[in-house]
Image (cartoon, rainbow, N blue to C red):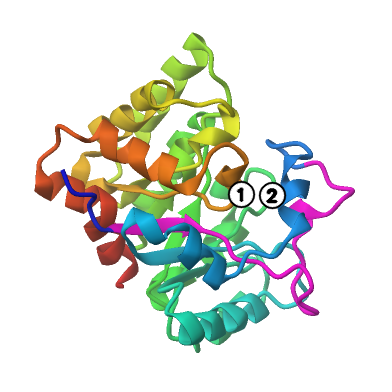
Amino acid sequence: MDKPEFVDAHVHFYDMQHPELFYAHWQPDVVHPSLGTLPRKLAKRNWLAEDFIEVSRSSNVTKAVHVQAAIGSDDPVKETEWLQAAAERTGFPQAIVAYADLRAPDVEATLERHCEYENMGGIRDFSYGDYLVEPDFHRGYALLEKFDLVASIAAQWQDMKKLVALAVKFPNIPIVMDHAGVPEERTPEYFENWKKGMRTAATAENIICKISGLGMADHDWTVDSIRPYVLHCIEAFGVERSLFATNWPVDSLFSDYDTIVSAYDEITGDFTAGERQALFSENAEGIYGI
C-alpha cells in the first residue's frame, strides 16, 4: 500500500538567535511542565522550515501547519511575520496557528495584525488558571469567529466538560484539540478516564481531535503501545473529525520522523483509502483552508 499524502498538522520551527522571538520552554533554566528538562536538547540547534522539509522528505508530506513555538516574546505577531517569510521562501508552513493573549484588552488589535499575513489560520493560548470558563477569556475567544480563526486547545480529560461547554457556547469556532487530549499517564485507571473524557469531548460537533504528541508521556513508545490511543480517538470522533500530526521536532526526542508517520500508516492499514486520506490530509486541509 502506498503511503498516503500527509499534511502534518502540528509542527514547530524556531530560531534561538532571533532577536525578537523568545522560546520560554526551551531555556536552560526552565523545567517543562510535562517533559522536564528534555526540551533543552532541542535548543542546541535551530529548527527551520528547510530542516523540516529535509526530515519529512520520505514521508510524502505535502503541507504543514505550524503551531506556536515562541513563548514569552514581547510581540507575538513577530513569529507570524517570521513564519510567513519562511513560507514565501520555502513553501512551508502552509498554515500558521499563532499566539495571542485572549484575555488582553487589546487582543482584537493583535488578531488584526496576525491576520495581515496570508497563512494565518488559528490561535493557541495556553492561558492560565481555569481559563476555559473565565468570562475575560471568552471575550477574546469570541473574536476568533470574526477573524475566521481556528482555536487550538490542549485540554486534558479532567476539563472535557468545560471544553464542550466552550464549544457549545461558540458553535461557529472550530476547536482543534491538541495531542489527543494530552494523556500524561500510562496506567489502566488513567486510560479509562481519558477514554471517557474523549467521548465527552466528541459530543461537541465543532471539536476536532488532533492525534499527535503521544511520545511525550510514552518515551519508549511502539506501534502497539500507541495503537489503543489512536484507535479510540478515531472511534470517538469518527474519521471525519480526526487528523494526524507529529508534534515535530518535540517528538524527535523519542523517535525519528518516518517512524511516527509509518506508525499511523500501520495502525490504519485496514481503513479504506478514503478514510486514510481524510485522516492524513483532507481533514487538516479543510479545517485550516489549505
Quadrant of the image occupied by residue 36: top right
Instruction: Specify few, some or many for label 1: CA neighbours under 10 Å numbering under 14, 14-19, or 20 or more.
Output: some
Secondary structure type for disc 2:
loop
**Highlighted range, magenta:** 6-31
Please give the name of the residue rendered at 24% of the width and 30% of the height, measured from the top-left corner.
Answer: 235
- Picture coordinates of residue 263, whole percent (x, y): 36, 36
Dominant secondary-structure state across the stretch colored magenta: loop
Report the residue marked by disc 2.
Answer: 128
Q: Which residue is mark 1?
A: 131
Given residues 181 and 37, the one toward you in this image is 37
Amino acid found under the numbered disc labelled 2: Tyr
| Residue at the image position 26 percent from the left and 58 percent from the top | 281
Tell me the residue at 65%/54% (across/down).
Answer: 127
Q: Is residue 263 magenta?
A: no
| Residue 102, quarter of picture | bottom right
Residue 178 in the image, given as x and y percentages of width and height: 47, 47
**Label 2 near label 1: C-beta < 8 Å?**
yes
| Quadrant where the image shows the N terminus | top left
Give the camera-side residue of 66 and 195.
66
Percent position of residue 184, x then y: 58, 28
> Can see residue 211?
no
* Nearer-the-camera pick, 131 or 208: 208
Q: Can see residue 13?
A: yes
Identify residue type, mark 1: Tyr
User: Marks 1 and 2, Cα distance to the nearest angstrom?
Assistant: 6 Å
Helix, strand or loop at disc 1?
helix
Residue at 35% of width from left, 47% of height from top?
Answer: 244
